[in-house]
């Protein structure tokens, strides 16, 4: 048996097709959506990610103001950069590219961000909104996984989902998202981690397994039920080499599986722009009603 693939590219294309007229409408109303990006240091992979997001922003008709701080930038420099974007009316949404140099406390910096401009959805206010189920920017990779499953008509509601990993960018918010009351979620979600040494007992009975550990090859074929849906979220980089959590032999057992490259990456970017456009729409509405 060979699993059917769940590429993220077509999902992202569908999201961009839906966003383009919304962006055009904002531009026509005099409010060009702005995605502000902040890079601290000169790490080439991070610079590449920022460039890709800026190019996509321009292609979609948005603007992308950018602040580049040096490798030796202080916490105060980063806070000043974030505050300048908080106060900049041309910036609807912003991100600080992760990882940052060791002298930077990324989570403390996040607290300085206007939560309504937090495009990654990781500010505690936005994680709180996620817990409460009220609208706000949703963490991009988890939102992209929900969109991916919905795009391929994979039923989630009422099914058993096991998330391997409880990290704050992926596993934990994904569990919250997929357990919300919504047709594309509404699942029975179990989260396993290092505190559950016999975690394969859970993944082996799951309808959908999401690997979110960041441990190369942690999910092996014997850990999944034949025909299960397998989503690979966790990755580790060794230099430029990408090492996914999901062992490639899982393709022989799974019913559906994300490709090793081009799975949740493209959907993450699409969700980032969805958050940015929603932020611009909220701000444009607010600015109009304030006039
Ligand atoms: N593709 C994307 O765009 C994207 C976006 C976001 C994140 N990611 C990737 O997703 C992964 C998770 O990121 P994160 O920030 O959410 O998580 P994280 O903070 O790195 O946490 C990893 C989680 O995996 C669990 N884990 C690690 N080794 C394990 C083991 N041997 N057995 C069972 N559980 C284990 C950890 O358990 P404990 O809590 O018990 O330590 C922890 O909960 C990373 O690889 C990251 O690069 C990808």
Image (cartoon, grey):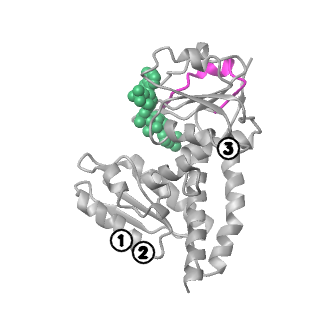
Image: 218 above or below 127: above
Residue 202 visible in this rendered orientation of the protein: yes
Residue drawn at x 71%, y 59% as measured from the top left: 17
- In front: 284, or 256? 284
Crowding at dot 3, Cα within 10 Å, few <14 / some 14-19 / many 20+, comes out as few
Q: Which mark is residue 181?
A: 3
Give the distance between the C-alpha atoms of the residues marked 3 and 1, in whole angstroms: 37 Å
Crowding at dot 2, Cα within 10 Å, few <14 / some 14-19 / many 20+, comes out as few
Residue drawn at x 68%, y 65% as measured from the top left: 20
Give the distance between the C-alpha atoms of the residues marked 2 and 3, in whole angstroms: 36 Å
Contact, CB < 8 Å: mark 2 with mark 3?
no
Residue 56, image x, y percentages: 57, 60
Query: Regarding mark 3 in the picture, which secondary structure is present there?
Result: loop
Residue drawn at x 28%, y 48% as measured from the top left: 101
Query: Regarding mark 1 in the picture, which secondary structure is present there?
Result: helix
Residue 41 is drawn in which quadrant? bottom left
Give the distance between the C-alpha atoms of the residues marked 2 and 1, in whole angstroms: 6 Å
Q: Nearer the viewer, mark 3 or mark 1?
A: 3
Residue 266 visible in this rendered orientation of the protein: no
Residue 274, image x, y percentages: 61, 58
Q: Name the residue carrying label 1.
A: 84
Residue 165, image x, y percentages: 48, 30
Q: Name the residue carrying label 2.
A: 88
**Range of residues picked out in magenta:** 243-258
């Amino acid at each position: 048996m060979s699993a059917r693939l769940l590429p993220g590219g077509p999902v992202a294309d569908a999201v961009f097709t839906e966003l383009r007229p919304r962006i055009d409408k904002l531009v026509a109303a005099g409010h060009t959506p702005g995605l502000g990006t902040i890079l601290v240091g000169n790490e080439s992979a991070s610079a590449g990610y920022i460039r890709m997001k800026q190019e996509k922003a321009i292609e979609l008709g948005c603007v992308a103001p950018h602040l580049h701080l040096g490798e030796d930038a202080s916490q105060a420099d980063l806070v000043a950069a974030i505050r300048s974007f908080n106060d900049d009316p041309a910036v609807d949404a912003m991100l600080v590219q992760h990882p940052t140099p060791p002298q930077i406390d990324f989570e403390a910096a996040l607290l300085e961000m206007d939560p309504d401009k937090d495009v990654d959805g990781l500010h505690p206010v936005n994680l709180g909104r996620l817990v409460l189920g009220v609208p706000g920017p949703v963490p991009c990779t988890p939102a992209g996984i929900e969109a991916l499953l919905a795009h391929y008509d994979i039923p989630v509601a009422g099914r058993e989902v096991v998330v391997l990993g409880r990290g704050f960018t992926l596993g934990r918010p994904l569990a919250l998202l997929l357990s919300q009351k919504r047709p594309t979620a509404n699942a029975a979600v179990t989260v396993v981690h290092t505190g559950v040494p016999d975690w394969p007992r859970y993944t082996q009975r799951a309808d959908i397994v999401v690997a979110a550990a960041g441990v190369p090859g942690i999910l092996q074929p014997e850990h999944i039920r034949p025909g299960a849906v397998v989503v690979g979220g966790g990755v580790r980089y060794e230099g430029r080499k990408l090492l996914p959590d999901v062992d490639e032999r899982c393709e022989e057992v799974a019913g559906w599986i994300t490709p090793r490259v081009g799975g949740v990456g493209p959907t993450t970017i699409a969700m980032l722009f969805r958050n940015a456009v929603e932020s611009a729409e909220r701000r444009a509405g607010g600015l109009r009603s304030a006039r």
